[in-house]
Image: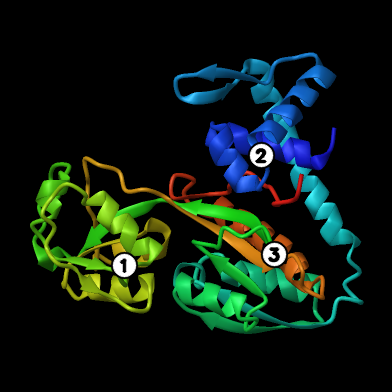
Amino acid sequence: MNIRFLETVLWLAKLRTLKATAEQLYITHTAISSRIAALEQDLGVKLFEKSGQGFEPTPEGIRFIEEAGQIVESYHRLRRVMLDPSKLRGSLRIGLVTTLTPTVFPYLVKTLREEYPHVSLSVTVDMADRLIKDLKGGRLDLLLTSSWPQDPSYEIVPLCSFAMGLVASPTLGVDVKNPLAVEQLANYPFVGYPSGTDSQMRVESYFSGVNQVAGVHATNGSYGNVQLAVAGLGISAVPIVSVKAELAQGLLVLLPTVKRYTSVHYAAIFSKDGGTEIPRAVASLARQAAASFCEAVDPAHAWQDQPTHISDQ
């Protein structure tokens, strides 16, 4: 039994299929099956059953997953602790999407100052696609983002997930007495995201099958979209935790919908081939910061994903 095997169980429990798990871990279906079989033989219990929805944890599997999650989390926490803070010195070029700027990032900065006082940050806030280009071009060392390259040369540390909601200014006149169907929402202008981005593709997926009114595109991510929504220019899909103040002040209303908008997942990304341990150490702190943030808000709006680090077979 080793950490990679435990991580495999956690991902299969989350994704439910061998295909999705293999793509996430960059290993073969056979390797996943072998890892699960080895664990089941070692433990003397069956961890998963095949169903119409994919692989479902057995009662024994559920208990194992709960304990395995804690073990994996403790292991990576121990790795971070073993890095001597006094020896971890230098600068880190970090890029993050706008949604994380007022949410997780302040927790990270506070923890970083306490844990690694000799590490300084250079921060870039931008759309995920441009951040990825800068990471690939060597202009950034670590990303906190909602999309990432499917490339085994990068390590991905899941941070958290945010529930998305459709919001609008009361001045837009959307009737919020009853849940709105997609066809009803399509009658209003929609504040979207730049074409080709994951954020805009989620918008298009939500409105698939209906004649959507052309959106007003914001070029600086969710912050710009919130401002346009507050100005009454249209409906926008944003993480609910990012508009708590606007909702409390009555500047925006959360629209009741028939169809739920997909949640957005965030992760820390860095190159496995970097010449310093700083990105890995700060990525671990970012996960800790994400946990602290999620504990401070409504668990229906933000939650932490199962821990795992992508590794070779």
In what quadrant of the picture does the N terminus appear? top right
At label 2, counting other C-alpha atoms closer than 10 Å, the crowd grade (few under 14, some 14-19, many 20 or more) is: some
**Which of the two discs, 2 and 3, labels the residue nearer the N terminus?**
2
| Left or right placement of residue 82 versus residue 284 in this view | right
Quadrant of res 18: top right
Q: Position of residue 249 (x, y in %)?
A: 29, 67
Q: How many marks?
A: 3
Q: Kindly identify which residue carries mark 3.
A: 283
Quadrant of res 49: top right
* C-alpha span from label 2 to label 3: 26 Å
| Left or right placement of residue 159 versus residue 176 in this view | right
- Tell me, yes or no, whether the two marked residues, 1 and 2, touch with CB atoms within 8 Å: no
Q: Is residue 293 above or below residue 37?
A: below
- Tell me, yes or no, whether the two marked residues, 3 and 1, touch with CB atoms within 8 Å: no
**Does dot 2 land on a helix, a strand or a loop?**
loop
* C-alpha span from label 1 to label 2: 46 Å
Question: Hey, what amino acid is under mark 1?
Answer: Glu
**Which of the two discs, 3 and 1, labels the residue nearer the N terminus?**
1
Question: Hey, what amino acid is under mark 3?
Answer: Ala
| Label at residue 28 | 2
Q: Kindly identify which residue carries mark 1.
A: 246
- In the image shown, does 39 or 90 lie closer to the viewer? 39
Q: Position of residue 273 (x, y in %)?
A: 77, 69
**Does dot 1 land on a helix, a strand or a loop?**
helix
Circle nearer the viewer, 2 or 3: 2
In what quadrant of the picture does the C terminus appear? top right
**Does dot 3 land on a helix, a strand or a loop?**
helix
